[in-house]
Image (tube, helix red, strand yellow):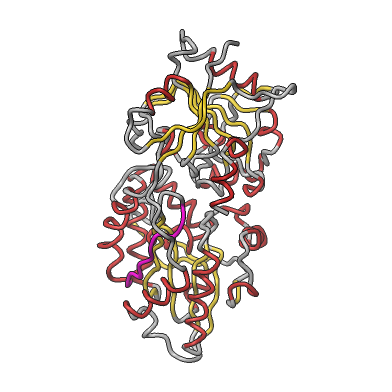
């Protein structure tokens, strides 16, 4: 196939220095007085999610240390819905893989799974939470505020979702997703969260806001009574700092890796413009005709949720899929579409051949194709010659080097995009 030539481009993101997670936590605790009600000898449960938040280990360790300074006992709850297979052991493993242990955080980790019903919403829909949440003196929600991968609404992913899915664990997550089919995600999360905030000893939350490079930008401590008011405002703020593709229309998008460490849906649905949720509103932009996924990240532990968002995958990606774990996540999330297997081809070249054969008539000089590492790290892209030339005239973009042919190896595989980024830039960011 006569592929277009490609060139490297870089999105110019603000280069503000990232704050110290420790200093940010301590400053917010002092400003808000979040821990003022904590007394000596009490227990304080902190949620610990499964998303790839680079600052999370230091944030949780600092929060735990502040609780210990009050002569209270911090307890980390693996708060991640059905991730880790939905089991206590599996979720402990997820925390360990992220460096969250009793030694690194200074907090005891809750290692069992026992659900209790604390109320109901609607016509008898139970509200379930981990029993430990009802037995501690205080609860602090910790989560990143960002767009959700399954819907568009005034509240998406943040403290309220952590209350519902995190404290509810696999059983609570399943009920919330089932209810969402009937009344939408936003209403399901809000209705269950109201019961949880009213009946559990929640002090408030620590909202994490990140920059375009997925680094900590700032933290905000939010008292429980202010979460419903403040979270929509924090969501809007987060959208201004979220990395996105710089083009509204693509014929082909090549993605090196997907995984749960990248996004809850494997690929960020708002980045690729495909939510693929039959009971929620679909994205209007960007519009991408065909998506090719090359690999599944090792950090995802075989969970290939989101693989169904692609049109073509490689055999390499398929061989890493744990069908049991993937099914558990997709069924719990009431999103079987995310677990459907696309057509798998033997290598990168054949997968790209199939994609380019399914975009209609095209010529190398006009086709709009982009190559990214994943949907989280979007500072660098390789783009076809048409987009490379277009980038010269777009604000916020700079071109690097010269056009090159796709560097296929004799096996039909490509290197990862990260290997093509100029070494001087990589070294400066280490």
Q: Quadrant of the N terminus?
A: top right
Q: Position of residue 262 (x, y in %)?
A: 53, 46
Most foreground residue, 39 or 237? 237
Q: Magenta segment: does it hold 257?
A: no
Rendered view: 226 above or below 367: below
Q: Nearer the viewer, residue 76 or 399?
A: 399
How many marks the image carries: the answer is 0
Residue 149 picture location, percent across and down: 43, 43
In this view, the residue in front, 406 or 98, is 406
| Direction top: furthest residue | 361
The residue shown at (54%, 51%) is: 428
Above or below for 197 versus 121:
below
Is residue 169 toward the left or the right of residue 194 in the image? Answer: right
Quadrant in the picture for residue 228: bottom left
**Occupied quadrant, residue 420:** top right
The vertical placement of 235 against 248, above or below, is below
Residue, x 42% and y 77% (percent of image)? Answer: 26
- Identify the magenta region: 214-223
Which quarter of the rendering shows the C terminus?
A: bottom right
Q: Residue at x 46, y 10 (%)?
A: 362
Please determine whether, in this image, residue 18 is positioned above or below residue 44. Answer: above
* Prevalent SS, magenta region: strand
Which of the pair 423/108 is nearer the observer?
A: 423
Residue 279 image offset from top left, x and y in percent: 37, 36
Name the spot of residue 13 as percent of width and height, x first. Answer: 39, 46
């Amino acid at each position: 196939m006569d592929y277009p030539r490609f060139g490297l481009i870089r999105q110019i993101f603000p280069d503000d220095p990232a704050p110290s997670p420790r200093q940010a936590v301590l400053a917010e605790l002092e400003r808000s007085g979040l821990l003022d009600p904590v007394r000596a000898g009490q227990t304080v449960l902190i949620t610990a999610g499964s998303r790839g938040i680079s600052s999370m280990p230091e944030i949780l360790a600092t929060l735990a240390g502040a609780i210990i300074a009050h002569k209270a006992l911090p307890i980390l709850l693996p708060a991640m819905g059905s991730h880790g297979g939905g089991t206590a052991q599996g979720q402990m493993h997820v925390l360990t893989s992220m460096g969250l242990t009793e030694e690194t955080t200074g907090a005891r980790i809750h290692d069992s799974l026992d659900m209790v019903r604390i109320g109901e919403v609607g016509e008898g829909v139970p509200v379930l939470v981990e029993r430990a949440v009802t037995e501690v003196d205080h609860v602090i929600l910790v989560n990143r505020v960002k767009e959700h991968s399954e819907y568009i609404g005034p509240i998406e992913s943040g403290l309220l979702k952590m209350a519902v899915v995190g404290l509810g664990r696999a059983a609570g997550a399943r009920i919330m997703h089932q209810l969402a089919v009937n009344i939408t995600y936003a209403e399901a999360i809000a209705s269950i969260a109201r019961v949880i905030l009213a009946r559990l000893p929640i002090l408030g939350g620590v909202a994490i806001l990140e920059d375009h490079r997925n680094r900590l930008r700032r933290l905000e401590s939010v008292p429980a009574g202010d979460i419903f008011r403040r979270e929509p405002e924090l969501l809007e703020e987060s959208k201004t700092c979220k990395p996105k593709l710089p083009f509204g229309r693509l014929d082909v998008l090549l993605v090196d890796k997907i995984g749960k460490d990248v996004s809850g849906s494997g690929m960020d649905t708002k980045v690729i413009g495909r939510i693929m949720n039959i009971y929620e509103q679909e994205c209007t932009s960007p519009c991408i005709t065909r998506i090719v996924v090359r690999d599944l990240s090792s950090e995802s532990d075989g969970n290939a949720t989101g693989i169904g968002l692609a049109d073509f995958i490689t055999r390499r990606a398929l061989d890493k899929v744990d069908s049991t774990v993937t099914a558990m996540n997709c069924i719990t999330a009431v999103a079987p579409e995310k677990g459907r297997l696309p057509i798998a081809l033997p290598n990168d070249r054949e997968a790209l051949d199939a994609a380019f054969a399914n975009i209609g008539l095209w010529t190398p000089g006009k086709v709009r194709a982009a190559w990214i590492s994943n949907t989280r790290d979007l500072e660098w892209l390789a783009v076809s010659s048409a987009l490379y030339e277009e980038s010269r005239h777009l604000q916020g973009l700079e071109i690097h080097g010269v056009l090159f042919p796709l560097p296929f190896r004799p096996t039909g595989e490509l290197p990862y995009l990260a290997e093509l980024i100029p070494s001087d830039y990589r070294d400066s960011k280490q």
